């Protein structure tokens, strides 16, 4: 789960990581009022979307007057911001963050993340931070350093000094970098974050270290035990279908293919997607309806699949073990009563109550293609999706 920059900065404050003074605003009037209350003569107004690359996409503006804030806010609020990280449809800008603009001297990159490969928390840092970090990673990877933290020993002062040297900091700044890195590490562990990224971490003209940007991603499987983090969820920034699926306890992930897949069990779902690929098709989603499913859940799952305009054909692949095939069939029929099915549906039911399930579907009068061989079912659905 992702959160907004302003929320990440609230957490930074709690963990002793310095951030500029600021407040979120949802209207142009409120944005101007925030700036007035902050005082000063320059402010940064930033679109709050769950994606980076805002600076290059016109989502970050340095304003020298209150009028400029109003103008920029009016222009941006209610639109969708398209950045390199959002895809063509962009993300809705419903909130802005207004901060006092600081005098930036240098921009660094600093992040910590759970590295699956080494099964450790690793830190990544670069003196060449800022909006072109992707290019730095691609063209001059030697300008990026990284190291693991031993979970038993924790983050060590010498590791922080290594980063301080890489940044070329003055010795008077070492302590504050150490404090920032310790804060990041503690926050990552205590709140079950998967990644915390500060890009840029800056030095100001007066030599202070400040986190000018903040991105935190949390482990979805841990969010439920952190009510404070759960409360930061912004469904407006999330895939609508995935959000709906979550409410019904379905494991659903949108993909960009044309074949909707409804499968029980994550393993079988993966295998089904592989098979669809092997037969030359491309899945429109991953969906595991789960073991202890019921008619209502299956109906919701089927509706979700059909709601995707990219879906040209659907493959239902159920191996009834704990899930009973007749429950799946009833779910499909319940969904079909509410929404019309305009695409071909290939159904393969096997296992517990398979015959009862097939009978229900056959007698429904729906235009379904029954299949009992999985490889053939995949072939059929690919052909149907292509209109063959
Ligand atoms: P991103 O493009 O989505 O990563 O958004 P950032 O928050 O990183 O902002 C983009 C860029 O705007 C930063 O790299 C800075 O160069 C600049 N910026 C952001 N905040 C300030 C600020 O307070 N003062 C100044 N001068 N520049 C800022
Ligand atoms: Mn940034």
Image (cartoon, rainbow, N blue to C red):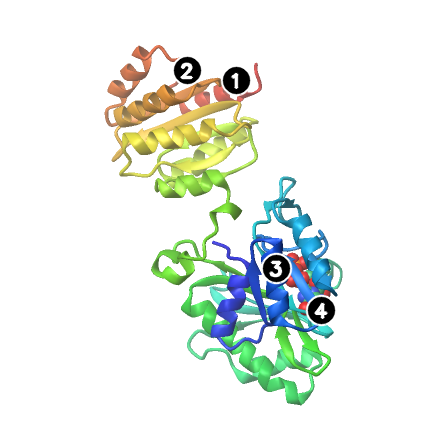
Give me the residue at 39% from left, 54% from top: 221
**Apparent side of residue 368 relative to residue 88 in the rendered image (left or right):** left
Quarter that holds the C terminus = top right
- Circle 1 is placed at which residue position? 384
Sooner in the amino-acid sequence: mark 2 or mark 1: 2
Whole-Å distance between the Cαs marked 4 and 1? 59 Å
**Beta carbon of the mark 4 residue lies under 8 A of ligand 1:** yes
Give me the residue at 55% from left, 28% from top: 310
Q: Nearer the viewer, mark 2 or mark 3?
A: 3
* Residues tagged 2 and 1 counted as in contact (Cβ below 8 A): yes
- Circle 3 is placed at which residue position? 31
Q: Nearer the viewer, mark 1 or mark 3?
A: 3
Give me the residue at 69% from left, 83% from top: 207
- Circle 2 is placed at which residue position? 369
**Residue 93 seen by the camera:** yes
* Residues tagged 4 and 1 counted as in contact (Cβ below 8 A): no
State whether residue 183 is above or below residue 48: below
Of residues 230 and 367, the one drawn nearer to the viewer in this rendering = 230
* Residues tagged 1 and 3 counted as in contact (Cβ below 8 A): no
Mark 3, secondary structure of its residue: helix
**Apparent side of residue 3 relative to residue 62 in the rendered image (left or right):** left
Q: Nearer the viewer, mark 2 or mark 4?
A: 4
Sooner in the amino-acid sequence: mark 3 or mark 4: 3
Whole-Å distance between the Cαs marked 2 and 3? 56 Å
- Circle 4 is placed at which residue position? 42
Answer with the quarter of the image where residue 167 lies.
Answer: bottom right
Whole-Å distance between the Cαs marked 2 and 4? 65 Å
Mark 2, secondary structure of its residue: strand
State whether residue 293 is above or below residue 186: above
Sooner in the amino-acid sequence: mark 2 or mark 3: 3
State whether residue 87 is above or below residue 200: above
């Amino acid at each position: 789960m992702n959160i907004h920059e302003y929320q990440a900065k609230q957490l930074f404050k709690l963990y002793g990581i310095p951030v500029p003074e600021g407040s979120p605003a949802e209207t142009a009037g409120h944005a101007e009022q925030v700036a007035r209350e902050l005082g000063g003569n320059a402010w940064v107004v930033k679109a709050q979307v769950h994606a980076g690359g805002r600076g290059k996409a016109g989502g970050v503006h340095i304003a020298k007057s209150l009028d400029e804030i109003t103008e920029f806010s009016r222009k941006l609020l209610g639109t969708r911001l398209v950045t390199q990280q959002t895809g063509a449809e962009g993300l809705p800008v419903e909130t802005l963050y207004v901060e006092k603009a600081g005098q930036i001297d240098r921009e660094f990159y600093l992040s910590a993340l759970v590295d699956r490969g080494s099964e450790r928390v690793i830190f990544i840092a670069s003196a060449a931070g800022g909006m072109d970090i992707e290019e730095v990673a691609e063209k001059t990877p030697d300008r990026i350093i990284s190291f693991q933290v031993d979970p038993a020993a924790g983050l060590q002062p010498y590791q922080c000094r290594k980063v301080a040297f890489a940044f070329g900091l003055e010795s008077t700044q070492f302590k504050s970098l150490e404090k920032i890195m310790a804060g990041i590490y503690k926050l990552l562990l205590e709140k079950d974050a998967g990644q915390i990224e500060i890009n840029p971490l800056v030095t100001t003209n007066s030599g202070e270290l400040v986190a000018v940007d903040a991105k935190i991603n949390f482990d979805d499987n841990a969010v439920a035990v952190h009510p404070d983090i759960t409360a930061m969820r912004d469904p407006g920034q999330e895939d609508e279908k995935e959000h709906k699926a979550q409410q019904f306890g379905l494991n659903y992930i949108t993909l960009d293919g044309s074949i909707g897949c409804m499968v029980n069990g994550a393993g079988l779902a993966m295998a089904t997607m592989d098979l669809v690929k092997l037969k030359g098709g491309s899945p429109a989603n991953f969906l595991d309806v789960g073991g202890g499913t019921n008619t209502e859940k299956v109906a919701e799952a089927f509706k979700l699949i059909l709601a995707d305009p990219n879906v040209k054909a659907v493959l239902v692949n159920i191996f009834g073990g704990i899930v009973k095939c007749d429950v799946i069939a009833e779910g499909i029929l319940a969904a079909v009563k509410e929404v019309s099915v305009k695409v071909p549906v290939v159904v393969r039911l096997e296992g517990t109550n398979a015959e009862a399930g097939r009978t229900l579907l056959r007698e429904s009068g729906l235009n379904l293609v029954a299949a009992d061989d999985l490889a053939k079912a995949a072939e059929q659905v690919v052909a149907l999706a292509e209109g063959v």
